[in-house]
Image: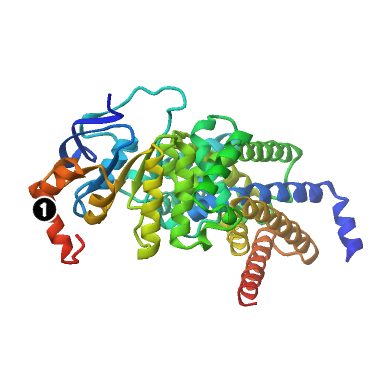
Amino acid sequence: MSMISADRLSVGYDGIPVEKDLSFSINRGDYLCIVGENGSGKTTLMKTLLGLIPPVSGRVVFEAEGPGNKGIGYLPQQTIVQRDFPASVTEIVLSGCQGKSGLRPFYNKEEKALARANMEKMGILQLKDRSYRELSGGQQQRVLLARALCATKNLLLLDEPVSGLDPKVTMEMYDLIRKLNDEGITIIMITHDIQVATMYASHILHLGAKQFFGTTDEYLSSKAGKFFMLRQKGGVMI
Amino acid sequence: MISKLIEYLSYPFVRYAVIVGILIALCSSLLGVTLVLKRFSFIGDGLSHVAFGAIAVASVLKISNQMLLVLPVTIICAILLLRTGQNTKIKGDAAVAMVSVGAMAFGYLLMNVFSTSSNLSGDVCSTLFGSTSIITLSKDDVWLCLVLSVAVIIVFVLFYNKIFAVSFDENFARSAGTNAGIYNLLIAVVIAVIIVLAMNLVGSLLISALVIFPALSAMRLFGSFKKVTVFSAILSVTCAFLGIMVSILAATPVGSTIVVADILAFAICCLTAKVRRTS
């Protein structure tokens, strides 16, 4: 059975759909890239998958949750608030364990160990006492990724994880995400960059006038895929 | 000078004022960081004006224990204001402004039309600037203040990690399964209690200073949420204590003296941060 499936899903705000009639399914270990023009509803779809906003119509079905199978890791786009928020790296990564701790007021040993392990995995352990607002963009994304990993064992949703990063750090970030995918974590990522999407993803969901869902190979031979690949090759970001 | 202080401190009402002042300063600094970062610096102002309106209604209705009316009304308004932060047609700052001036006008109107007091402008002035009320606290007031402050501190410590998660990134917290709505509600209730408490100390017009200055000062110097919270609490208590002492010795109004102390502390923190960065 698929991990997440959407059936004739329409997403939007206040009952007004931004994107209609989406049907797709994601299996364990997949790497799905959501692409499409600005305003095509990529972030809205992601928020719907996360349960932050209700679907306008249709539904999202999650695989039955077993033990240790709870929680989604989410890497949101940065907000203005976070840019001058006084918080240390450890504090932020630990807050990823929040969803599991229920009403317990403080973090326990396992959660602290998990946070430490994830910081190590992301290569930011040496930054653990630094203040988040002093870090570079790439380091900040690693912190947020470590936090997302504290919240999940198997599903990461990433919203434009490389926006504002320089090319070198961007590639590092993509490699990191691919490594996580190789370890069996399902990835759903929003991106502007169709080249990157076709390079890394196993599946593509294209939003907009020409909707598409399928494997990357199918996408490359589809009309929508060819059209957009061509447009971006000229160096024009959509 | 010291002997004069000791003499003053031997009066119970002065001791009450010092105890209450320190507790209020401690409580009001706790949520400062959250409110500043959620862009709700002025919520203190808005709510205290609501409390002012409620006090006016209470005095017109001749309710002996004004807290019984003021506290619930302020809490309800806090919930409405903080809830409307995200998804309404009237945005946060505009909603705060609307409620605050509305309650203010309504309150003053009521006081003016129905007042039985011979010194109306004196009454209004003391409610706005808290000029004397801290010195005239009864033992019951002190107890109420004590209980409420301790409750605020306990709630804050127990929910410290949740408050952090919700103020740093509400969407993430919700996606990870934290019930952000409830914690926003909790923040609203706590801030309302703090505002009503703090009105005794500095009056309605100056409350925002008590809430935001310690947090802003601490944010200049420290980079972790815990350090900022602890330092702003210490700073707030120190400033309140010094402010009360100076106001006793120099016979200045308590509220504004404390706020001036807070401003000086902010200036010192800014300078220190600058020196540290250049060195």
Return the residue nearer the eye: B122 or A155: A155
**B37 above or below B139?**
below
Return the residue nearer the eye: A159 or B108: A159
Return the residue nearer the eye: B79 or B137: B79
Q: Is residue B57 among the parts visible in the rendering?
A: no
Q: Is residue B230 among the parts visible in the rendering?
A: yes
The C terminus of chain A lies in which quarter of the figure? Answer: bottom left
Is residue B43 found left or right of B159 in the rendered image? left
Residue A26 at x, y percent in the picture: 27, 34
The amino acid at mark 1 is Lys
Mark 1: few/some/many CA within 10 Å (<14, 14-19, 20+): few
Q: Residue at x 74, y 51 (%)?
A: B135
Is residue A14 found left or right of B221 in the rendered image? left
Residue A111 at x, y percent in the picture: 57, 36
Name the secondary structure under disc 1.
helix
Residue B263 at x, y percent in the picture: 63, 66
Is residue B174 found left or right of B54 in the rendered image? left
Return the residue nearer the eye: B244 or B92: B92
- Identify the subunit bearing mark 1: A
Is residue A73 found left or right of A86 in the rendered image? left
**A56 above or below B206?**
above
Most extreme residue toward the bottom, as rendered? B278
Q: Residue at x 65, y 54 (%)?
A: B227
What colouring method underlies this structural image?
rainbow
Most extreme residue toward the right, as rendered? B3
**B106 above or below A5?**
below
- Quarter assignment of residue A14: top left
Residue B130 at x, y percent in the picture: 64, 54
Tag 1 residue: A226
- Quarter assignment of residue B213: bottom right
